[in-house]
Amino acid sequence: MEPARKSDAADTSAGSADLFDASADAAAVIRDDGTVVGWTRAAEALLGYPAPEVVGGSAARLLAMPADPARAAGIAERCRGGNGWSGQIRVRHRDGHPLDVRLRVSAAFHMGGRVCFLASAGAERPQWTMAQSVLDGFLTRSPVGMAVLDRELRYVWLNDTLERIGGVPRPERLGRRLGDLLPGLEGEALEGLMRKVIATGVPVTDYEYAGWSWADPHRRHAYSTSFFPLVDADDAVTGVCTMVLDVTERWVARRLLSMVNEAGACIGTTLDVTRTAQELADFAVPRFADFVAVDLLEPVLSGEGPGTWPLGAGQAPTRPAMRRAALSSVREGCPEAVHRVGERVGFLTAPYDTRTLVQDDPLFVPVLDPEQGPWVTAEPRRAERIRAYGLHSLIAVPLRARNTALGLVTFARSTNAVPFCSDDVLLARELVARAAVSLDNARRYTREHTAALTLQRSLLPPALTGGTALDVASSYLPADPAGGVGGDWFDVIPLSGARVGLVVGDVVGHGIGAAASMGRLRTAVQTLADMELPPDELLAHLDDLVLRLGAEDNGSGAAAQSAAAFTGATCLYAVYDPVSRRCTMARAGHPPPIVVPPDGPAHFPEIAAGPPLGLGGLAFETTEIELPEHSLLGLYTNGLIQACDDVERGMNRLARALTRAAPDLETLCAEAVSELVPRPQPDDIALLLTRTRALGTDHAVSWDVPDDPAAVGEIRALAARQVTEWGLAELVMTTELLVSELVTNAIRYAAPPIRVRLLRDSRLTCEVADASSTAPRLRHARSTDEGGRGLFLVAQLSHRWGARYTGEGKIIWAEQEIP
């Protein structure tokens, strides 16, 4: 790129003068040996020397300062390397006075076959200080990177900004091509554009591309580049100038908007919660992440409740119940996942805990280290998967919509070696926010859609508890999922004295009519059980009720059209006492229960079948069996054992299924139903499993009471001592009053033998047994009466009280809440 110049000094001076007409600075052209070969009129005005006196001579005689050969050589070397130089020097005016000037020396260029430099200077005047600083900033600190490349697309000059953007030192750039230095950029495309500019002379402006540079190898940047042709005096293209601007923020915002708009078309195509969650996971892989897991709160999946959980004032949130709703991975089968779809998902310790959901702040782990996370000890399986599949970066974003917590979405990268950055966190939040709205819409729709089934399903117990007597699990499958529950039902009813009532029944048929009949019978059983009736008497009353309800339906005049008319039902009712470990039961045409002792084979106790409910006129028999602690007791409906078209074979299969090991009762119950009923059946199916516990001597004590009023004080003292030993000192006074009143009434109005028993389970129970069957009566004594306030005090002091009858008499009991 040699500009055409004449060799004699006069012509050179003229050419140079034309070149600097637009500048107020003095300028001179100096050869590499220090000889002045060009002198402008501005230089003559500044120093007073006319061109003939200077051109051809040494520039050193113009200096008014000691010569510094080393510094001069360094400046020359810098300028030969393609860089300019600027600084302050002192020169001598023609009249002899010194003058401080600001000197700028250009990069070396060739003229007439010799290496030359362009030196420009201006007197140090305050009005030029700003102009100089602006020029220096433009060349060295401008946010725009600039470079000059020759026709072979090799770098011949670049500013500091471009050096900083690319991360490649200037000496390594000069003389080399873009594709050789920055392979992470679109080298071929960019060089193609530069060749086009050289060939056509037409600039290319604002060309955007994305890539990586050595300056920031872990983050993808976007750049806007413009290319301009460099021309000489004859308008021949001698190279190309490029200007580069980092537009990553603008590019990220546009990419974010584009992906979010695309997500809006792909996520939320249905009003199904799990389908929407899977659409989110599938959309993000592999566009954004290599592995995505969507975990939702159980109320969101079930369509029940608001999707939130209670928070204590100033306290950490309780651990929510969450299940995995969706998975997606670049690897087939999602082997990175510790939990599969449908499984319960746990939380780790802080800061990876439930606060992530509450505070609505994403969890960003740019570098995921399996050796230094809370999962190392708390979740070894998770740490193992992180190592095995190279998960190295993670973002977890809470799913929230309309101020409601819905769940958590986890994004991870493995095959993509670039870790997540702060821009990716913003994109993840936007994607999850869009999906959260769709999920919340699906959740609301599901909740409204299931509202029609709520009444039917509410007829079954929403939650079962066996108190301290039993561990309980259940499973129910309707015959037709679209039609809701049918006529099968089960229940667990707490009774006095830590006992528990268990019931399972089956109304003939299914659908709305069977569900209505089942609701009536379930309410009736609860009422009769609360009256402390033994199993055979309870079934007898229930049989009478079925007869009466059937008669009412038949006499309604619309019996043929009545879907709720009773056509019959079966039932089994059992009462388990954890103190005696005995179970009393009776059945009305229902299959017998199954018992699996802790150290024995499963068997079906021989219990009199009894007639189905609604026949009337036939008696029911009670059978009592002893159950060792930790025995498994199962009650079921006939749909479970008739699924294989052979009742005996079905009972044998049930016995085998319940004798297998399982981590918990719920799992055993679910696996047994799944094994026996692998596909939908024409009949409802219910299975109620319980595992027995026993209350030992440390939970129950009893004393025989002499038929003597003087014994009341001794029994009261014994009861107070026992309650104190149990650590319930605050209940001592109330217990003494209850014991006194109940024992006094038994001695005064009942018949011996009299026995007092204290039970400590979830409540503190005081029982007084006697041989009389006379029903206790709560009286309202007048102010002048001397007695009649005993049971009134018992009712006021206790949480609840009542009486039940035994073969030997009755028991009056009173319960107190344990603080």
Image (tube, rainbow, N blue to C red):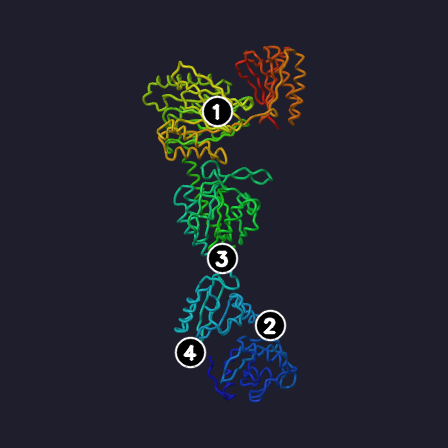
x, y percent for residue 666: 48, 34
Read off the residue under disc 4. Answer: 236
Read off the residue under disc 2. Answer: 129
Helix, strand or loop at label 3? It is loop
Give how far apart the Cα atoms at labels 4 and 1 are. 101 Å
**Callout 2 touching callout 1 (CB < 8 Å):** no
Of the image marks 2 and 1, the number of the one nearer the N terminus: 2
Read off the residue under disc 3. Answer: 418
x, y percent for residue 303: 44, 37
Residue in front for this viewpoint, 30 or 475: 475
**Callout 4 touching callout 3 (CB < 8 Å):** no
Q: Where 121 falls versus 211 (above or below)? A: below
Q: Which mark is residue 502?
A: 1
Q: Quadrant of the C terminus?
A: top right
Give how far apart the Cα atoms at labels 1 and 3 are. 59 Å
Which residue type does callout 4 highlight?
Answer: Ala
Choose mark 2 or mark 3, whichever is in front: 3
Which residue type does callout 3 highlight?
Answer: Val
Choose mark 1 or mark 3, whichever is in front: 1
Of the image marks 2 and 3, the number of the one nearer the N terminus: 2
Which residue type does callout 1 highlight?
Answer: Leu
